[in-house]
Image (cartoon, coloured by chain):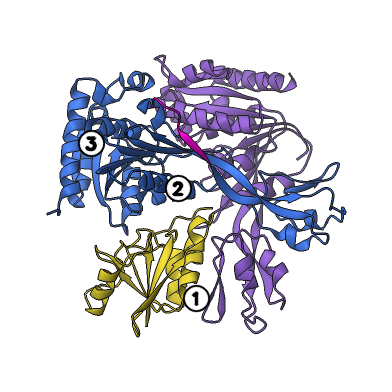
Amino acid sequence: MDTNLKIAVLSGKGGTGKTFVASNLAKIANRAVYLDCDVEEPNGHLFLKGPVLEAFDVDLPMPEVNLDLCDNCRKCVDFCAFNALALISGRVKVFDKICHSCGGCKVICPQNAIEEYNKNIGKIERRHYDNVDVYTGILNPGEESGTSIIKKMMTTIPSGYETAIIDSPPGSACIVMDSIEDADYCVLVAEPTTFGAHNLRMVHELTKVFNKPCGAVLNKTNGEEDPSRIYCMDNNVPILLDIPWRKDISDYIAEGSLVVEKDKELSESFAALLERISQEVQK
Amino acid sequence: MRIGIPAEVKDINGPVSNNFGRTQYYFIYDDSNENYEFISNDAANSQGGAGVKAAQLVVDSKAEIVITPQLGENAAAVLNAANVQIYKCEDGTLMENIKLLKDGRLTLLSSIHKGYHGH
Amino acid sequence: MKKILILSGKGGTGKTTLSSSLIRLLDAKAYADCDVDAPNLHLVMEEENEPLKSDFLGLPAAYIDPAKCISCDLCRQNCRFDAITNINGYIVNDHACEGCKVCTLVCPSDAIEMVPRVIGHLSLYKNGHVFSTAELKMGSGNSGLLVTEVKKHLYVNSKNADIAIIDGSPGIGCPVIASISGVDLVILVSEPTISGFNDMERIIKTSEGFPAKVAVCVNKFDLHLENTEKIISYCSENGIPFVGTIPFDKDASSLINQGKTLADKDGPARDSIIKIMERSMKILNEGDN
């Protein structure tokens, strides 16, 4: 992805304000692309609104056994590192959900009895809002892994953007790692509770594994003792922005509005946040 | 007919294992001649798909009936495709469960769980 | 040995708070931490001696022997996970390699072998009691399998214990399912919030199909009495034993930081946990002669 500055926005748990921060950052940036990688429940497009301009299917190759050619030699069953194949009553059965689409069974079959078909696992939608190009990754319900959707998004978006904002999935599992792989900087959004701090620690650990510079945005702060702030101070995570809980912010979010379009002070805060991130990356 | 039961230890008076996919052994009992054997479960240490691999092992051993405390959906799919009957075990040893089966006192397993999906 | 598992759904509900307190109150000689992604029971239990550590291996990763590699590029072309690159020689990226072994099939010069990958560590503390825990290296999958190992490790080393307390993983996925297998009683710690209620429902659903008994308690119940009532009603309507409530205690975090459990401090929290313990033990032992 040929973009000047790629910022991933993460949070250890849902409901912290990840999409809130990501969507507003995208709006305030110049010539930005917004990549919604929360493929199970994408909602960036609820704020950066617009009709779907284009949709791309995302498929995964799945093996299919031609029973006429198969001679039950079991090489595929025995080779599969993921145990996704079983030989029962003379038929090879494929377990889609366990299959990693590696193509190994097809390569090893001495009878060339295995072909691959494209199984649709999701799609990518493109929208446009004001100065932002919005890409939304969507995983079909029931599918296990959104990795291929994220990878496709990262590789097929056009070049020439100034800034890419990656709305990562919540948590710290493999799929989050896929979303931050290309990022220049990670913004960790945290709420001021013990659970918030616990989950902040997990995403922070993740950024350390991938050697990504990071900083925190403390959201919904209330002026009281904040375990997430304490975590940041104890672990040298720069606190980039502190957004107090305010009823009007909460209302803007509930109605799907971008706060940077409604509130001058917040608009300046987000602009300053973007500027600060730029500076941190250049260090 | 042959009956398979997951077992943690190689002892006919030992308990039924509480885990079908990752049990250490399967106790395979042959009703026709009262012979039995314990086979090692290679799926025990698989990263993923343990249910599939374990069920494959049981099917390969020609068991027509399985007695287990519970079963994940992948193992169940393999056993069902092979027309293996699945019974819910009762408290007791391997041999006690065989006796309960012969006396018609075991019920078919009615609920399959989502499985561990270790991936 | 009877096994009690403590689960909670989302993190931060009080699972470890309850497990550690129960371990103290019951003087349990066998306990385990199945939260392998972010273990924290050891921080509270303050073990005196060093544990016995062992490696936990993941799916082996491919390794290309530079001496045998003829740079034909077939491995890189056939790798579906972009795990092989050619920068001053062909190298496999450990994180990206999924262990599928396709590269070993296509390599014409036998230059690729699969080598074991350490993706975590198991620790066993033994000091009159047995404590089994583990940590998964960040970036690995396979938590469910490691959870099963932690439990196996515990059982094998503590055959004479009457009771085992297992601090489960947060969430509702594979590691949770792996924790539930083989236990006698699941104590579900919920909190009086919307997500707390939803998670409780989902865990109850997840536990169906397992022989374990399930009981529910509410932590920090006084933060929202109405939601607490909702939980109690839900349990009553669904025939699930409700074993008690624990009041919010703002000292809980600092106690934990000092390596103390809520049961170590006199007060309403301790008293309520004792009640939960008594009711849970009654359920656990129901049906025994």
Quarter in which the C terminus of chain C is drawn: bottom left
Q: Which residues are magenta?
A: C47-54
Q: Quadrant of residue C171?
A: top left
- Residue C207 in the image: state x and y as whole percent: 32, 53
Q: Relative to residue A160, is residue C7 drawn left or right?
A: left
Mark 2 = which residue?
Answer: C149
- Residue C48 belongs to the span the image colors magenta: yes
Tell me which chain appears yellow: B
Residue type at mark 3 is Thr
- Residue C56 in the image: state x and y as whole percent: 54, 44
Q: Relative to residue C223, is residue A140 drawn left or right?
A: right
- Residue A212 belongs to the span the image colors magenta: no
Name the residue rendered at 56%, 39% in the picture.
A44
Q: Which colour represents chain C?
A: blue
State if disc 1 and disc 3 touch (CB < 8 Å): no
- Residue C81 in the image: state x and y as whole percent: 69, 52
Which marked residue is nearer to the observer: mark 3 or mark 1? 1
Q: Main secondary structure of the magenta part?
A: loop
Q: Which colour represents chain A?
A: purple
Find numbered disc 1 in the image and state the secondary structure of the residue it sits on: helix
Residues packed near mark 1 inside 10 Å, few (<14), some (14 to 19) or many (20 plus): few
